[in-house]
Image (cartoon, rainbow, N blue to C red):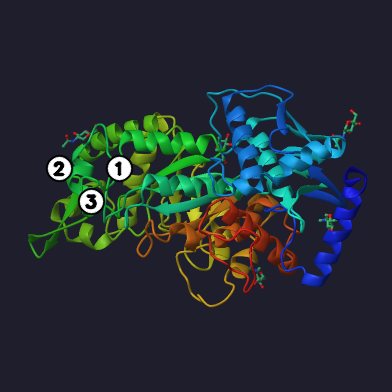
């Protein structure tokens, strides 16, 4: 009878298949690799979709119930929405009934505490443990965020064997991320990206356990954020009236992210990167002079006027109430001093303040006032590295994001001053330097703690971010250009420092790529020739 032999035979078939095919793609291997992972070659057949259940064995909440539904669909039908993408993979409906006694039918999910008004944060406990046994399997976590990580991992352990049956190996996992800030920057200023694509990208982030969507929402080229208090910003700053994110759009993105354990950290980059999309705010930008006359162009925000801070106070008050995350990214990169230098009113101000000709003092004056505004609003903040490079003294809880080359020297410097830091220099995925080849290996090989510093300094490294700047990227290529190249970074930021084998990563990232394809994402091949069981 089928029921007696099936598990044994399955094991054998898979083994032989693995040998004969040269094993260029793993089967049911998780990405990113958990902290501790033990898998046996004992295979359990998944029950049919109808019989299968996740059971809330501890606290429950809507976030968890929604995730149960999503992952049940992902496991059995491929996509989270249970579309007709892969309906035929319900083959196990038949097997589930035949093999009722030896199939995996229930997964008990025990969450200590889960509340529906929770948001993930930098301090969230994302740990979980997972055990796949014969009939009973379990996921245990302190928080809903750990529970979501566990569900994602569980879904990745299931795979179709050579006979087209959905199976899972017996597995034990203890997991917790190496870094707590695992971000991905998307630039929606240089090109506008529609909300559905942003949501798709959040799905991909959840499949890779990236937990911060750094939304570089505006920049000098366009201001698509539709402000409540200052509607003129997008009215004159967006590419067109339809190239905007309304308050409803923003709320939708934040909620979609939250349900997947992802924080949304918006960036409103000042004082540079503002000309001319912020230009509708009267007197905000510095008029640049040629000789003794304004030349019609504008430079960075004018730090000398009280009206500047009145505006920032009101604007940031809105931003901190619209975006629930504790951290707002304040930019601060590439401040061009030339325009400030040309402006006589600013020269007078410098004199009165005793700044001499040191324009970084003026920058510091601006940043200090902005950070004070943020502190009064009870908000945390991140800035780009130039703020520190220009010797601006900032508050000790500032997060400094490093993007320029020679990041190791910068990390040594920034952490010696006691600031927490994030690495992006090595993760600029918008740069496609060698399109014909496996550039993911370069991202994979970076260790963010590989710099000269004390243990205390290394602890100040809280993670990193993939950057996808938008000069040459819009909705047509965001997803394929990012994935699965960004997966290489996601494993680097989640998995233990010792997980470095490229050979092992290669067969797992190939499977993970196919997994994302099956889930409906248009993600490109990156390990060379091969095939997916389900092609796009
Ligand atoms: C899972 O089980 C199959 C079949 O026995 C085996 O070939 C494979 O190596 C196992 N996977 C792992 C990671 O142990
Ligand atoms: C299955 O249940 C038994 C009895 O409660 C328990 O000892 C065992 O650890 C469980 N196995 C798994 C994988 O959860
Ligand atoms: C700007 O504000 C400061 C401090 O509140 C005040 O002393 C100063 O007079 C103000 N300047 C102008 C031009 O209003
Ligand atoms: C900042 O300084 C305060 C007071 O000295 C200290 O309690 C806090 O831990 C520091 N924060 C960081 C991130 O270093
Ligand atoms: C650390 O310092 C040593 C000795 O000064 C130097 O040789 C090495 O290149 C440095 N390593 C890094 C990663 O900067």
Given the current orientation, which residue lies at the most extreme left position? 293
Give the Cα separation between the discs numbered 3 and 1: 11 Å
Q: Give the residue displayed 39% in from the left and 59% down from the top.
A: 476
Give ligand 4's quarter of the image: top right
Question: Residue 225: which numbered mark, if any?
Answer: 1
N-terminal of the two: label 3 or label 1? 1
Percent of width and height locating residue 328: 42, 41
Q: Which residue is mark 3?
A: 277
Percent of width and height locating residue 361: 33, 52
Q: Is residue 458 above or below residue 131?
A: below
Query: Is residue 322 something that shows in the picture?
Result: yes
Q: Give the residue displayed 47% in from the left and 33% down from the top.
A: 255
Q: Is residue 447 above or below residue 146?
A: below
Image depth: mark 2 or mark 3 in front: 3
N-terminal of the two: label 2 or label 3? 3
Give the Cα separation between the discs numbered 2 and 3: 12 Å
Percent of width and height locating residue 6: 88, 49
Image depth: mark 2 or mark 1 in front: 1
Q: Quadrant of the C terminus?
A: bottom right
Q: Is residue 70 above or below residue 11?
A: above
Question: Residue 282: which numbered mark, if any?
Answer: 2
């Amino acid at each position: 009878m089928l029921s007696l032999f099936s598990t044994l035979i399955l094991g054998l078939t898979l083994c032989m298949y693995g040998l004969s095919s040269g094993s260029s793609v793993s089967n049911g291997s998780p990405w990113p690799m958990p902290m501790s992972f033990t898998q046996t070659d004992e295979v359990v057949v998944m029950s049919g979709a109808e019989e299968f259940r996740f059971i809330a064995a501890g606290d429950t909440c809507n976030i968890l119930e929604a995730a149960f539904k999503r992952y049940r669909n992902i496991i059995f039908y491929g996509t989270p929405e249970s579309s007709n993408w892969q309906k035929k993979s319900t083959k196990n409906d038949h097997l589930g009934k035949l093999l009722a006694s030896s199939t995996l039918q229930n997964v008990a999910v025990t969450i200590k505490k889960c509340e529906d008004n929770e948001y993930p944060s930098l301090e969230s406990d994302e740990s979980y443990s997972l055990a796949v046994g014969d009939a009973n399997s379990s996921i245990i976590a302190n928080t809903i965020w750990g529970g979501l990580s566990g569900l994602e991992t569980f879904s990745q352990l299931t795979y179709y064997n050579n006979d087209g049956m959905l199976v899972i190996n017996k597995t034990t996992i203890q997991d917790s991320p190496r870094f707590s800030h695992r971000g991905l920057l998307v630039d929606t200023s240089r090109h506008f990206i529609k909300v559905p694509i942003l949501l798709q990208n959040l799905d991909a982030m959840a499949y890779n356990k990236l937990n911060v969507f750094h939304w570089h929402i505006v920049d000098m080229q366009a201001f698509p954020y539709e402000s409540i208090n200052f509607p003129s910003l997008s009215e004159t700053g967006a590419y067109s009236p339809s190239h905007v994110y309304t308050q409803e759009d923003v709320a939708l993105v934040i909620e979609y992210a939250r349900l997947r354990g992802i924080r949304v950290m918006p960036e409103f980059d000042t004082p540079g990167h503002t000309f001319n999309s912020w230009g509708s705010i009267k007197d905000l930008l510095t008029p640049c002079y040629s000789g003794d006359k304004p030349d019609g162009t504008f430079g960075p925000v004018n730090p000398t006027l009280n009206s500047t801070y009145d505006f920032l106070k009101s604007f940031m008050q809105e931003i901190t109430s619209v975006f629930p995350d504790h951290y707002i990214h304040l930019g601060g990169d590439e401040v061009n001093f030339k325009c400030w230098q040309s402006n006589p009113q600013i020269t007078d101000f410098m004199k009165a303040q005793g700044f001499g000709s040191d324009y970084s003092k003026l920058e510091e004056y601006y940043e200090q006032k902005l950070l004070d505004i943020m502190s009064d609003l009870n908000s945390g903040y991140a800035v780009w590295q130039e703020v520190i490079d220009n010797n601006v003294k900032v508050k000790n809880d500032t997060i400094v994001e490093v993007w320029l080359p020679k990041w190791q020297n910068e990390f040594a410097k920034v952490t010696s001053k006691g600031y927490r830091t994030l690495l992006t220099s090595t993760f600029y995925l918008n740069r496609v330097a060698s399109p014909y080849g496996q550039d993911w290996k370069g991202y994979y090989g970076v260790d963010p703690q590989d710099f000269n510093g004390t243990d205390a300094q290394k602890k100040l490294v809280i993670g990193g971010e993939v950057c996808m700047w938008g000069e040459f990227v819009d909705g047509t290529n965001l997803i394929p250009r990012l994935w699965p190249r960004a997966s290489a970074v996601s494993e680097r930021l989640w998995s233990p420092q010792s997980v470095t084998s490229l050979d092992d990563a290669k067969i797992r990232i190939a499977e993970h790529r196919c997994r994302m394809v099956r889930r409906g994402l248009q993600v490109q091949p990156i390990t060379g020739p091969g095939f997916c069981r389900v092609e796009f």
